[in-house]
Image: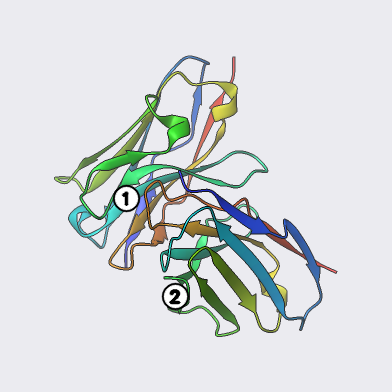
Amino acid sequence: QVQLVQSGAEVKRPGASVKVSCKVSGYSLTEVSMNWVRQAPGKGLEWMGGFDPKDGEPVYAQEFQGRVTITEDTSTDTTYMELRSLRSADTAVYYCAAADSIAAARFWGQGTLVAVSS
Amino acid sequence: DIQMTQSPSTLSASVGDRVTITCRASQSISPWLAWYQQKPGKVPKLLIYKASDLENGVPSRFSGSGSGTEFTLTISSLQPDDFATYYCQQYNVYPGTFGQGTKVEIK
């Protein structure tokens, strides 16, 4: 069974950066496509970016272009999401989600709360 | 980016009711449409993938249908455990956009 374990909660100042990690166990990172989804308080799910299973290249939602970078370390089966130039509207729970052969996000991390406040 | 529009935003129903949620895409995405269930404070859970395939362990009262740009999630007989928010997501073209969600409330 796949497990995704994310790093702990973060509190950041506006303008700072945050890097959230997500370690995969039960599968190799090469067997899944990793995605990052966020959810602001009381709001819906928002797909930020992920590795396109068609070619393995990172793709980012337009809203986050230039501000987010998603990377992988296959030696440790860990994926990372870095979001820069943080603002209060970035306060949210950030989830990693893994898609296997079915391509939909079957497995989810527990979520990481990132709070942005001055 | 492909836009996904869910309706209704909120749905009030009783235990035993048949419930249908609709999701429309701004362009054809067949069959790459998933449905997720999320309860307050919990992680989203995959219910349906490839528009109509039931995820392992999901009760058979959940079903998905549709093609092209219009899709539906049906709960044949609503149970107390089903009161939650439901999201559709297209994954035909990255980025894999979500609908805005449908909250199913107790009537």
**In the shown orientation, is residue A20 left or right of residue B51?**
left
Q: Residue at x 35, y 56 (%)?
A: A98
Query: Where's the C terminus of chain A, which quadrant?
Result: top right
Query: Which of B11/A83 is in front?
Result: B11
Quadrant of res A68: top left
**In the shown orientation, is residue A88 left or right of residue A42?**
left
| Distance between the alpha carbons at the discs numbered 2 and 1 | 19 Å
Please rate how many residues cluster around mark 1, counting C-alpha atoms within 10 Å: few if below 14, some from 14 to 19, many from 20: many
Q: Which residue is drawn at 43% across and 78% down?
A: B56
Please give the residue where the numbered disc 2 appears in the rendered image.
B55
Quadrant of res A58: top left
The type of residue carrying mark 2 is Glu
Q: Which residue is drawn at 71% across and 75% down?
A: B19
The type of residue carrying mark 1 is Met
Please give the residue where the numbered disc 1 appears in the rendered image.
A34
Q: Which residue is drawn at 57% across and 56% down?
A: B42
Please rate how many residues cluster around mark 2, counting C-alpha atoms within 10 Å: few if below 14, some from 14 to 19, many from 20: some
Given the image, what chain letter belongs to the residue carrying mark 2? Answer: B
